[in-house]
Image (tube, rainbow, N blue to C red):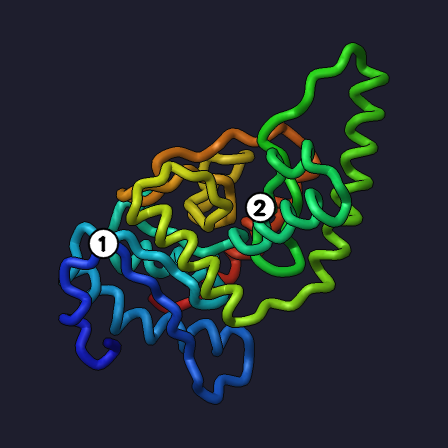
Amino acid sequence: ILSDLSASADSKVVVLTVNSLGNAQTYLDVIQSNVDLFRGIIPAISHYSQNTVLLVASHPVEVMTYVSWKLSAFPKSRVIGVGANLDTERFQYILTNLLKAEVLAKDAWIIGEHGEDKVPSWTSCNLVANQTEAMAARNSREKVANRAMEILKGKGQRSWSVGLSVADLTDSILKDKRKVHSVSTLAKGCCNINSEVFLSLPCILGTNGVIEMVKLEEDPLVQEKLQSSAGSIHDLQQQLKL
């Protein structure tokens, strides 16, 4: 389809998996090569499928989702990166099946930057009687989460598992499932982030992309990590030629 983008006409979802195979020497060169590819692809896709949802799986996913958003001029809701959807599914599986912490798993998410800087977070908190119990509950949860993260980081990412994750996201969009996924979305305005960067956050997905961002439990350490990731991603984006 790359040689004839008119074949994508009137698509409801367009999945972008292309990555440069050039001989770039530095990390910035590799990303710029991907940007150059997208400069030739995104405007054509936007022309042929003006109401589509762009689902970006190219790396680095946060930056390439931002690039897709800028080049397409689509609303932010219709440009999504695969983000931490796969990591979240694995994290929830580890909590439920390996660590037997099913109560924690249903509200657990991996958010932030894809890769080593991802962080666990929660969409709700069980209410307890007093501050001492609250602190004990938080400490217990953090121990379980840390163990789950250790297991998660020990697992690689097979191409087929990434493909299943992309299929899962596409299914939620096409069937308007209103299901929550941790995907790369515009994070400006969240957690005191003021720059135009995309980070993985739990979002409800439907036929028009992101319907709503799900509110996370407030955690200063998590917010600090998100702000740090946003800063490094923004600095990298400033060096790219769009």
Q: CA distance from mark 1 to mark 2?
A: 26 Å
- Reply above or below: 198 against 24: above
Q: Which residue in the structure is indicated by mark 1?
A: 12
Residue 77: image quadrant is top left
Q: Is residue 223 visible to us here?
A: no
Asked if 162 appears above or below 75 in the picture, the reply is below
Q: 139 and 159: which one is in front?
A: 159
- Between discs 1 and 2, the one toward the N terminus: 1
Which residue is the site of mark 2? 111
> Closest to the observer: 18 or 95?
95
| Residue drawn 20% across the image and 58% down it | 11
Residue located at (25% from left, 73% from top): 40
- The amino acid pointed to by label 2 is Ile
Can residue 50 be seen from the camera position used here? yes
Q: Nearer the viewer, residue 10 or 68?
A: 10
What is the crowding at mark 2: few (fewer than 14 residues within 10 Å), some, or many (at least 20)? many
